Image: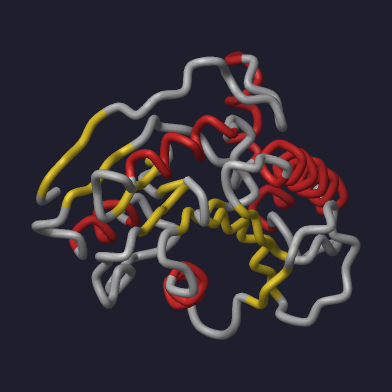
């Protein structure tokens, strides 16, 4: 995996600017605390792993903020989520990108994603809500991998996979990201607390022409 890059997408941790849907259920201060805790845990868990280089892709581009780790930072730039993700991923020959709101995410998920890119053009981590918590692209990627995606809907993963027809794609295990108070509450019965990944981590299936 030498030379592989892990990109952590992150927003400057400011009151009222992060996890707004979650804040509607638990309050802006509690949402900020959750975000800071989760981002710091993710940076510790993934940023110290020597199997890949880790960078933070941040927004706003020049925000002054107390970032939780001394990782290299790059601006996400302008555009919708797809444009910003494409820009970040296309800087590298082989890269994996994740958000900062997946408490179950662990280093072995990232290792599994890079292994998948050894035999596929792309890898995705499906989310419970129809989106995805991870995307990784190898050198043979489509020019417009995120064209026509209905972001923040249950169609996000399906729309993205439509851009990868006739290409080899690997899907990892399904995880829940935390966008709402209901998402946060749903984690508690399973024991998957923020910053603590569950033990079973492995790819689930490989698909062609999704």
Residue 182 picture location, percent across and down? 60, 34
Q: Residue at x 34, y 65 (%)?
A: 150
Residue that protrudes farthest toward the bottom in the picture: 78
Query: In terms of image quadrants, where is residue 174?
Result: top left
Q: Residue at x 71, y 64 (%)?
A: 11
Please name whichever residue, 118 or 8, is drawn nearer the observer in this view of the structure.
118
Q: Is residue 153 above or below residue 86?
A: above
Q: Residue at x 39, y 30 (%)?
A: 173
Please name whichever residue, 140 or 173, is drawn nearer the observer in this view of the structure.
140
Residue 56 picture location, percent across and down? 68, 62
Query: In terms of image quadrants, where is residue 153?
Result: bottom left
Query: In terms of image quadrants, where is residue 177?
Result: top right
The count of marks equals 0
Residue 142 picture location, percent across and down? 24, 70
The colour scheme is: secondary structure
Residue 155 picture location, percent across and down? 30, 54
Asked if residue 1 lies left or right of residue 72, the reply is: left
Q: Residue at x 66, y 61 (%)?
A: 55
Asked if residue 114 lies left or right of residue 169, the reply is: right
Q: Is residue 157 above or below residue 113?
A: below
Asked if residue 30 lies left or right of residue 106, the reply is: right
Q: Is residue 50 above or below residue 60?
A: above
Q: Is residue 78 above or below residue 120?
A: below
């Amino acid at each position: 995996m030498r030379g592989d890059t892990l990109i952590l997408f992150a927003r400057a941790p400011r009151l009222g600017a992060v996890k707004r849907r979650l804040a509607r259920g638990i309050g802006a201060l509690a949402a900020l605390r959750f975000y800071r805790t989760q981002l710091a845990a993710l940076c510790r868990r993934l940023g110290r792993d020597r199997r890949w280089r880790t960078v933070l892709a941040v927004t706003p581009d020049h925000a002054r903020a107390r970032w939780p780790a001394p990782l290299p930072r790059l601006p996400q730039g302008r555009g919708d989520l797809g444009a910003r993700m494409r820009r970040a991923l296309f800087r590298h020959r082989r890269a994996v990108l994740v958000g900062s709101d997946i408490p179950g995410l662990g280093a072995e998920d990232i290792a599994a994603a890079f292994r998948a890119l050894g035999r596929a053009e792309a890898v995705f981590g499906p989310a419970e809500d129809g989106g995805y918590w991870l995307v990784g692209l190898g050198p043979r990627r489509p020019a417009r991998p995120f064209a026509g995606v209905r972001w923040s809907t249950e169609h996000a993963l399906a729309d993205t996979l439509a851009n990868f027809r006739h290409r080899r794609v690997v899907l990892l295990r399904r995880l829940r990201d935390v966008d709402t108070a209901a998402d946060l509450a749903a984690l508690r019965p399973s024991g998957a607390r923020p910053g603590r990944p569950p033990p079973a981590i492995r790819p689930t299936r490989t698909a062609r022409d999704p």
